[in-house]
Amino acid sequence: MARLPILTHPNPVLRTIAAPVTALTPELVKLVEDMAETMYSDDGVGLAAPQVGASVRLIVCDPVPAEQQGKDLLVLFNPEITLGKGEVEWEEGCLSVPDVNAWVTRAERITVKGLDHAFKPVTFEAEGLKAVCIQHELDHLDGKLFFDRL
């Protein structure tokens, strides 16, 4: 595994809509591993492929306390939110926008579908920080940054 450089605003890759993933390749498996390493080493709770220069629809999330990290890493290819319920305000930061935090309103609970780390279809519900993390990372796949929601 390797730590990848994180692109920062205003890099144009961060404003590009990411391409769907059509097949699980050895390169994508390595990208997942490297993204996880990068996220953990930078004390992040989520990371989208465009943030490391790969304009594909892939995110990793692990919004848990440090001592639990790595036990339940969420990997999603081609993720979509199919339902959002309620509202929650959360103070967000972003590895691609260093030293900036802001309160963002997002759906409190979401239903998500996509492909897991083995490229198998999954559908699940998320709430709290996990839901916020997924929504934040999906924005990256659509060329949006958290401050666009302010």
Image: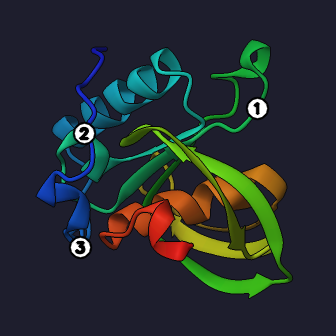
Residue 79 picture location, percent across and down: 48, 68
Horizontal placement of 63 versus 141: left or right? right
Image x and y of residue 9, in percent: 26, 49
Secondary structure at numbered mark 3: loop
Residue 64 is tagged as 1
Tag 2: residue type? Val
Residue under the image location 77 percent in, 13 percent down = 67
Q: Is residue 111 left or right of residue 96?
A: right
Residue 78 appears in view: no
Q: Is residue 86 left or right of residue 49?
A: right
**Circle nearer the N terminus (3, 2):** 3
Q: Are marks 3 and 1 in contact (CB under 8 Å)?
A: no
The local secondary structure at tag 2 comes to helix
Circle 1/circle 2 CB separation < 8 Å: no
Q: Which mark is residue 52?
A: 2
68 w.r.t. 89: above or below = above
Amino acid type, label 1 = Val
Query: Which quarter of the rendered picture does the C terminus lie within?
Result: bottom right
Which residue is drawn at the image coordinates 69% and 33% (left, top)? 72
Q: Viewer-proximal residue, 14 or 9?
A: 9
Q: Position of residue 1 (x, y in %)?
A: 31, 14
Q: Is residue 70 left or right of residue 8?
A: right
| Residue of label 3 | 17
Quick check: can you spot residue 57? yes
Mark before the other along the chain sequence, 3 or 1: 3
Query: Is there CB contact under 8 Å for labels 3 and 2?
Result: no
Q: Secondary structure at mark 1?
A: loop
Q: CA distance from mark 1 to mark 2?
A: 22 Å
Q: Is residue 113 above or below residue 28?
A: below
Q: Residue furthest left?
A: 12
